[in-house]
Amino acid sequence: MASRGVLAPILYLVALAVGSVSIAEVCWMSVTSYRSAYALDRLFEAGPALANRVIVVVLDGLRVDRAVGLRAMGALSEQGVSGTMRVTLPSLSNPARAAIVTGAWPEVSGVTNNSDFASPPIQSLFSLAREQGMEISVYGSGFWRRAFRDHIGDSSASSPSGKASSYETADLIAWQADTCAEATALVRNSSAKLQIVGLLAADEAGHVYGGDSDGYREVTAAVDNCLGRLVGAAGEDATIVAVSDHGHIDRWGKGGHGGEEPEVINAPFAMAGPGVRRSEPIKARIVDIAPTVSILLGLPIPANSQGSPLWDALDVPAEHGSALRNLERVQREALGNHLPNREVALAAQREQRLPLAIASCAWFLWLAVVSLSRSRPLASIAIAAMVFVAAYYALFFLLQLGYSMSSMVRQEYIYFFLGRLVAVAAMAFGAAAYCLRRLVGPGNGPVIRLSTLVTSVFAILVTVTYYIHGLRMVDWMIEIVPGFKAYLHLLSILGVVLATIAAVAANSFVGRNEARAS
């Protein structure tokens, strides 16, 4: 059993670990439980329609570099326009899908993740089309029905009738063929002026094989083949907008998304048909899709749209040009007056965080200095600390972790991912504690001081992120990359404390046995 001299610092470390886990959970819940308070309840005027009907094909998980050379995507590009677009952060499917039909970033739509979200309380292409009596058809992810049930209606939305029998490439291609037959029949037989079709197989292949793999290339070719079939079934009177919601990393033979890697945060798009003119490749944002489709269909621009119609891609009659651009100007001005100034709000939040950040940094810096000053010899603690850093990052790499949400492979794997992280911190500290024992001999004091030093450094890193970026989502989306890294540092504290308790228990056990032997 630990001596009384060790009990107090152990209790402190346990309290620190519990607090760190609680903070990480509260901060992540602030993202997943976020609900938008920014709905603008105003119906704007609409202009004349440039197209009879629009079919938005969402190519789930298609990378920019993979879109190059695909036949159907190339054909749309040659007939109209193509380019790249910046997607949402986090670069997850559901926030991106919400942005496609609302024109709003996650902090305004309220869809911030793939698992826990409410129906966006803002206008969408669906609600505006229904307001004008337009027929709607949606096929693909169950997200559409769950998030926009009130706008779509149950009878207008459907999902694939079957699932892939496995993640083998051949089975994913076969599943894509089956779902394509369903989607093509819907497009051919539907009279809906607004249609959404989601093709999901590329994303599955990206997760399983990575974004630069043969499996991914084969499945995306099948997805592109389906896009070509959809274009043929739609007929010449339909305008096609093909857009990806995110890309995929390629790491350790697996994919993933959620972070801001260039291959993830940038996605391809192409559009062609009535209302679209041939143009050079353009750069856009995913929030530009909704206002562009609104102009094509003669709908009002969604009130909370933060995007702009892709005027360079639109074939606007000269007599309507100034009037249509005025519709955008009116909507943008109204939204600008409605939304708080983001930069001013974030600066105010940062100022509010400063006192606590200073106090926290001072506390943990004092603990780190005390831990070093009481260590004799100092070189032993320094060597053990270096062993921890080397072991931590070596295991971090070997267990395929990373400071990005994309490294989780899938969002549903988050707890497995975080469990590996805690294990990495625990094993690294175990190696450092063993090194320390070899250098200074048995005793719990040096281990406690090393643990206090390591956890204090992690806590200082978290505090710096807390001050600069914030850890909780308050009105505005947090900075995902530094925020996610801070969450990992908080959970690393738990791993270090668990290993510290194990090391102290082991030292006490060995000490008792040695005492009995003597």
Image (cartoon, grey):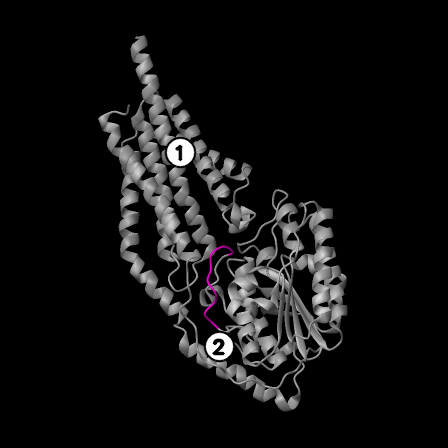
Quadrant that contains the C terminus = top left
Is residue 456 a member of the stretch shown in magenta?
no
Residue 69 visible in the snapshot: no
Q: In the shown orientation, is residue 399 left or right of residue 271?
A: left
> Which one is in front in this view, the residue at disc 1 or the one at disc 2?
2
The outermost residue toward the front is 155
Q: Position of residue 102 (x, y in %)?
A: 53, 71
The residue segment tinted magenta is: 114-122
Q: Position of residue 294 (x, y in %)?
A: 58, 78
Q: Secondary structure at mark 1?
A: helix
Q: Position of residue 455 (x, y in %)?
A: 35, 39
Residue 483 visible in the snapshot: yes
The outermost residue toward the top is 518
Mark 1–mark 2 Cα distance, whole angstroms, equals 55 Å
Give the crowd class for mark 2: few <14, some 14-19, many >=20 residues within 10 Å. Answer: many
Quadrant that contains the N terminus = top left
Q: Secondary structure at mark 2?
A: loop
Which SS type dominates the magenta stretch? loop
Query: Residue at (33%, 14%) from the top-left corner?
Result: 513
Would you name the residue on which mark 1 appears? 385
Closer to the camera in the image, 373 or 167: 167
Query: Residue at (73%, 78%) from the top-left corner?
Result: 237
Q: In the shown orientation, is residue 159 left or right of residue 26?
A: right
Q: Which dot marks residue 303?
A: 2
